[in-house]
Image (cartoon, rainbow, N blue to C red):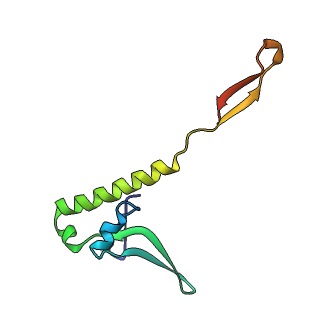
Amino acid sequence: MFALVASDTLFVKVDDITRDEFVRHGLPPFIREAGWGRRTVFSCHTVSVGALEASAALCEWARKGIDAAARAAAAKRKPAARKTIPLDSRAGLTHQTRASE
């Protein structure tokens, strides 16, 4: 997910690389009131009103969200773990390595 709309407001995904730029422009994060006074701050910030009125500017902010989402997805992917399993010792082999399923 690179963006969301809540309460008629567009929010774009941010990460450690892009968050400072949103904060510098005074663009607040998406905050969800969770009841009992608890609040959850999400890694999405609003875009400027000017960007909503200019397609080129909106594309720039959207690209920042797409890039942040791509980096987050890449960080979640991990290489497959390798397992060592015993083979039939009569075949002259004692172990084989294969990718985990």
Residue 29 picture location, percent across and down: 38, 73
Q: Quadrant of residue 94?
A: top right
Residue 99 position (above or below residue 42): above
Q: Residue at x 79, y 13 (%)?
A: 91
Q: Quadrant of residue 15?
A: bottom left
Is residue 99 visible to the viewer in this orientation of the structure? yes
**Relative horizontal placement of residue 93, taking residue 72 as reference (left or right):** right
Nearest to the observer: residue 18 or residue 9: 18
Q: Residue lying farthest bottom?
A: 37
Q: Residue at x 28, y 69 (%)?
A: 47
Is residue 11 visible to the viewer in this orientation of the structure? no
Residue 25 picture location, percent across and down: 26, 73
**Relative horizontal placement of residue 64, taking residue 87 as reference (left or right):** left
Q: Residue at x 65, y 29 (%)?
A: 98
Residue 17 picture location, percent across and down: 37, 60
Nearest to the observer: residue 37 or residue 79: 79
Q: Quadrant of residue 11?
A: bottom left
Rendered-image quadrant of the C terminus:
top right
Q: Residue lying farthest top?
A: 91
Rendered-image quadrant of the N terminus:
bottom left
Residue 87 position (above or below residue 41): above
Residue 39 position (above or below residue 47): below
